[in-house]
Amino acid sequence: MQNEYEIKKEICDIGKRIYNRNMVAANDGNISVKISDNEFLCTPTGVSKGFMTPEYICKVDAQGNVIQANGNFKPSSEIKMHMRVYQERPDVNSVVHAHPVYATSFAIAGIPLTQPIMPEAVIALGCVPIAKYGRPSTMEIPDAVSEYVQYFDAVLLESHGALTYSDSLLNAYLKMESVEFYAQLLYQSRMLGGPKEFTPQQVEELYEIRRQFGMKGRHPANLCPNAKEGKPSCHTCGGGCSSKKDASAATPELVAEITKKILEQLGK
């Protein structure tokens, strides 16, 4: 079992990975790890995630109140969002928030990641809905995320970024990688005329593979809000996981908007 210092080092390592993979810019993003029912380690506000050392990491309680922080370091203002996930998902031990370019571009354009285009994404990641826009550091974001946290392990934040969570810090980070890779593939396949989606039967077959693997987490294969209401599964809902009713339409205008946002964030 890791001690607190080892967990802090791991947080710093994951922070560097997020920064080096262009998932955040400047001081963006935040990471947290649950170490007991009322103790959590988290990244500080106003600090680049690519340049942290263990003494930067803060400790807070389940309400986000500071238990321990060195010098002038203060917990991220987004800690409320993390605490809501821990509150509603007892199986979660780590939360990662970042602004990966492709996934955030979909969030800005209002397009959820629901198209079933590759087996790995369908089996391991599931769908990635969009939580409606909320003002940073307010309770609006936790309230928006709350709508989806029981059904999915990754959520896009409208006009903001992405949020992933899992039973370990490594797994939460890997989900963020998977979200960004999925978004990039979906974007590029749309540039080539549109992806070839799996049929509903093929999606169900992939769901069954996941069930046989006994994979942890929340996923449409086991817990789908649409299926509970007799609707098509999240992977074939036509964008019903979006905060905007017409967000799934891949119109030229939406594609152009995504392209513009991606090029802006890539500095081109």
Image (spheres, rainbow, N blue to C red):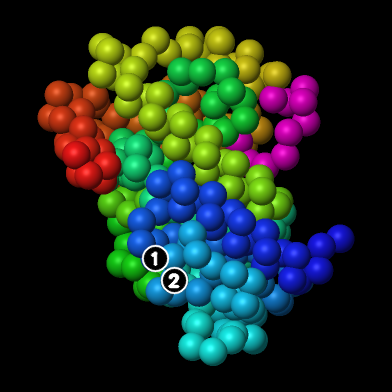
- The x and y percentages for residue 21 are 46, 44
257 vs 147, left or right, is: left
Residue pointed to by mark 2: 47
The residue positioned farthest toward the left in the image shown: 253
Visible residue check, residue 11: yes
* Vertical arrangement, residue 267 with respect to residue 116, above or below: below
**Residue at the image point whose x is 77% and y is 26% from the top:** 213
Between marks 2 and 1, how big is the CA–CA gap? 5 Å
217 in magenta: yes
**Residue at the image point whose x is 42% and y is 48% from the top:** 23
In which quadrant of the rendered image does the C terminus lie? top left
**Residue at the image point whose x is 47% and y is 20% from the top:** 116
The magenta stretch is: 210-219
165 in magenta: no
262 vs 78, left or right, is: left
- The x and y percentages for residue 154 are 52, 44
Residue 123 numbered mark, or none? none
User: Which of 11/65 is in front?
Assistant: 11
